[in-house]
Structure formats: structure tokens, C-alpha cells
Image (cartoon, rainbow, N blue to C red):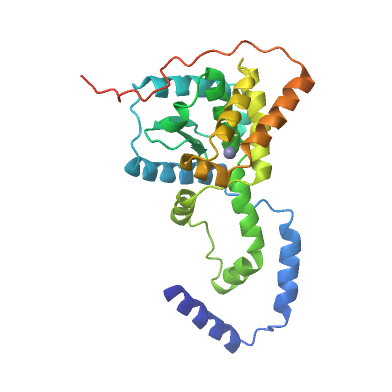
Amino acid sequence: MAQLKKQHSHAHRLDNMRLPIVAMPLGLAIFTASAQAVDFRPSIKDQIKIGKEASAEIRKKEKVLPDSDIRVKVMRQLGQQLVAKIPEAERKKNPFEYSFDVIDSKEVNAFALPGGPIYFYTGLLNKMKSLDEFAGVLGHEIVHIRNQHWASQEGDRMKRQLPLAILLTIVRAGDFAWDLAGLADAVLIGIKYSQKHESESDRIGFDLMTAAGYNPQGMVDTFKMLSAGRKMSDFDRMLSTHPDPAKRAETLEARIKKEGKVYPPMRPLPFAPQPLPAATPK
Ligand SMILES: [Zn+2]
């Protein structure tokens, strides 16, 4: 409200100055045209900051397993192995702060926050049988961060709002910056990646997991498992934010067949596929 008032008074001042209002649309058109070449994505630093803020909120609300839990330990080992397969030059250029945690919840899902934090739910781990399945989903989530999917969407959104943003910049005399707190809230409300980004994460996640010595059949198995559970309410959220898992399994299977590569045999998860009691410090 206060902001609206402020703009209003500025507008009046502009009127009083007899600014040639007709020149505005032309100016906006030029700004809009040149904006095509501008990168509107939040910076790597901002992505990390927003991801950390969102992560802190999650930790307040969810039961995050302790570092000593075997599932967390395995996840971190896998995570390090996969991240190590990202070229070093790229990691130096985009120093994302990857972190790997498990939330104790029945939800059959996993998610990535901008800049590095990745969370798996025990509900998903309990449905998995192999390290290769774990590595497949982890690779997928890492690529959402590595390829800045959230930031790309934010950038596109900013670009669409550009005429308004410029108007506000003019009226508010350059007082235009990322509202980091607001963005962190938006991240929590729901990260919804586009189909294009989901496919990209599948494809490059496949590259990462196979480079680290895992069998991509694990990724196929995961999508088949998710597809088999379609009717369960647990899957509702997963399905509403992700493309059809049966189709994704098919795409990956076709690639494995086409490439004809031999992969190491799948390895079982080194923990029981049942909820373990959270480790309690003695
Ligand atoms: Zn995804």
C-alpha cells in the first residue's frame, strides 16, 4: 500500500515536470528489444542464498535425519561421486554448494532447491532397492541445480515483466532489486520445473550416474516404480509436478538399447528398505 502511494506521488511529480509521456512506449520498446540479449537469471550467489533460506525453513518444519543415519551417509557419498563427474572448470565457475539430506516422511519424492540443497524423503528411499536407483534420482536432482533450472524460470518471468519493471525503475529511480526473502518463500510454495527441464535432468542425470559407475537401469526402475504407484495418493504431488513416469522410463530404456553400452551390475542399497529408527546419540 505504502509503495503504491509512493509511486503515485512520483507520477504526479513527473506530470508536473511535463515529461513527454508519448516518448515512453518507444523507450519501452527499445528496452524490451535489447533485453533479449540480457541474462535475467538470479546470479549463482543469489541462487545459493535463496536455496539456503528455503532450506532453513524446511528444517524448521520437517524432521531431517541426523548426519549419523546410514541413509544420509550413503546419500552424501553418492552425491559426492556424482558431483565429482561435473567438469572441474564448470564447478569453479559455478560454485554451487551441494548438500544432501533425508526427510523422515512418507512422501514418495525428492527435490532440489536453487544453489545446492537436495532432499530425499524416506518414503521414496523405502521404495528403492538399488544404489543405482538412488544414484539415478540424485543425478536428476543435481542437474536441476547444475543447469540452474529455477533461475532460468525466474529469469524468464522477469523478462516477461520487463516493461513493468522498467516503468517501476523509472518511477522509483532505480530502486529495483531482487527481493530475496520473497523469492525464498516462492521457492517453498512449490518448485515446479517445466517438462523441458525435467527431460534435461533425466538426460544429464543419466550421464552423471553412468560416469560415476552406476547402471542406468536404476533410473528406469525408479520411474517404473513411480508409474506402478500412480493410483496411490502419495504419488499425487510427484505426478502433478513431473511428466508421466512411464514415458520417462521408456525414453531412458530406448537410449540404453540404442547406445548398447555394458554397465556394471546393479548393487543393493546398504540399508534395509524399511524405515530405520532415527539414530539417537548415546
Ligand atoms: Zn525433476
Q: Residue at x 43, y 54 (%)?
A: 181
**Residue 4 location (% of width, % of height):** 48, 76
> Is residue 179 placed above or below 219 in the rendered structure?
below
Q: Nearer the viewer, residue 261 or 217?
A: 217
Q: Nearer the viewer, residue 245 or 191?
A: 245
**Residue 211 location (% of width, % of height):** 65, 18
**Residue 249 location (% of width, % of height):** 66, 30
**Residue 210 location (% of width, % of height):** 65, 19
Q: Nearer the viewer, residue 175 or 67?
A: 67
Q: Residue at x 74, y 15 (%)?
A: 261
Residue 201 visible in image: yes
Q: Nearer the viewer, residue 88 or 148?
A: 148
> Is residue 10 placed above or below 60 in the rendered structure?
below
Q: In the rendered image, which quarter is residue 73 located in? A: top left
Q: Residue at x 60, y 17 (%)?
A: 214
Residue 95 visible in image: no
| Residue that lies at the very extreme toward the right in this rendered image | 258
Q: Quadrant of ligand 1?
A: top right
> Is residue 68 placed above or below 242 in the rendered structure?
above
